[in-house]
Amino acid sequence: MSVPHALLALLREGPKYGLRLQNEFESRTGEVWPLNVGQVYTTLQRLERDGLVEATGEGERSQKRYRITSAGERELAAWLRTPPELVPPPRDELVIKVLVALQIPGIDVHEILQVHRRHVIEVMQRYTQVKAAAEEDDVALALVADAELFRLEAIVRWLDAADVRLKQRPSLAPAEVADMPLEPTHPMEVSQ
Amino acid sequence: MTSALELRQVSKVYGSGPTEVHALREIDLSVERGELVAIMGPSGSGKSTLLTIAGSLEGATSGQVLVDGVDLASVSRSDQARMRRRSIGYVFQDFNLLPGLTAVENVALPLELDGVPSKVARATALEAMEELKVADHADRYPDELSGGERQRVAIARAIVGERGLLLADEPTGALDSVNGEAVMRLLRAATQRGVAGVVVTHEAHLASWADRVVFLRDGHIVDQTVAPPGPESLLAGGGRR
């Protein structure tokens, strides 16, 4: 989550104080990403240094109000259109665990896959509870929860596919497994 | 307390000799009123067979199936049929609404088949449709409704009257993910009002609406989730990214 760009987006609606930016950031991200007010002011100072926001004078209790500059508007527009980093981590821990399990005689790999499947679905149940407890028209929270749910579901689908592949090829020779690349060629974590 | 559904050592074998297939093996499963259970598993794991046996649409080879404490094998075929109409509601992937009947007539049908006078059946059906927010479409025919609306009508038909057990086989299969989620919300709401629900799905994000997820493999229950600790546990530790 890019806090600087989220603050620029909020300032595009008009000048705001730091405390208000903190409250709006949290409510619009479904309160899933807490942000402390110190972090807001540090970020605003950095944005001011870079010419992306400017102070519009001081209000009550010497609080500064900030507004977005035209350079800030351009930066925000460019950021919205820049694809996020989609390259997976160099070694996916779950893939490594399964490949290692394949090399150990006497290990039931299907049982290992099931342990991880259950764990992932239990985490998904918790995100779904967040969604179920929220108002049905809380779009921001639904979008945040959906992003996590579909990312996790991609892991479940990989586990399901691994189960079927291993069932179809039950006698994978250890030497064959040892030759498998530990860096996955298909990014498992990239689901969206 | 009597479970709404209880399977005791249920096995199902199709064919015999070399073509014998063990679809279910010694399944033990209880579902309480107020609980939504999702069944997940790969193709051929026995998910749909479990559901049809739980709903007495077919019999088990061995073991017992109890609905509200009544062993289905101990009652006559006509009593089984009555139990299916009165106690069990079914939701299917392709809705299974009768095209020649309006939405409210479809919902009232199981009551009328059970001898409830037509006016009373219609009023009860409209109440169920109100709950599912489709009462406005009561006099429309199925082909005049969207996929999501048809599935709401199908769920209204499944919960109408005093049904204690709701069985759903891939009920969101024909819908996009947001409409699929709406169906899961409705199934969850129905169970929270005191019905026991069992839903078969292969989609993890839909199964996660259930209180408990049961995993089937080769006809066995191999695992199930434990009650989640609550959403607040996700927020501990600050921002996630």
Image: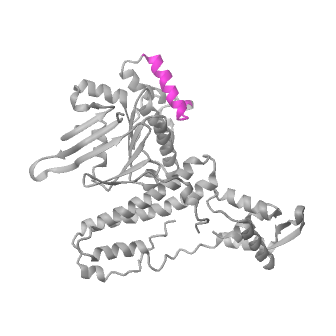
Residue at 53% over, 74% down: A86
Number of marks: 0
Q: Does the magenta stretch mainly form a helix, a strand or a loop?
A: helix
Q: Horizontal placement of A18 versus A167: left or right?
A: right
On whether residue B145 falls in the magenta region, the answer is no
Q: Position of residue B74 (x, y in %)?
A: 21, 29
User: Taking the image as drawn, is residue B170 in sight?
Assistant: no
User: Furthest residue to the left?
Assistant: B17
Q: Horizontal placement of B233 versus B171: left or right?
A: right
Q: Quadrant of residue B130?
A: top right
Q: Quadrant of residue B162?
A: top left
User: Taking the image as drawn, is residue B7 in sight?
Assistant: yes
Residue at 83% over, 67% down: A67
Q: Is residue B10 above or below residue A94?
A: above
Q: Position of residue B56 (x, y in %)?
A: 28, 35
Question: What is the span of residues highlighted in magenta in the rendered image?
Answer: B117-135
Q: Quadrant of residue B42?
A: bottom left
- Coloring scheme used: one colour
Q: Position of residue A7 (x, y in %)?
A: 73, 67
Q: Nearer the viewer, residue B76 or A13?
A: B76
Q: Is residue A143 above or below residue B166?
A: below
The quadrant of the image that shows the N terminus of chain A is: bottom right
On whether residue B122 falls in the magenta region, the answer is yes
Residue at 44% over, 51% down: B227
Q: Position of residue A19 (x, y in %)?
A: 78, 62
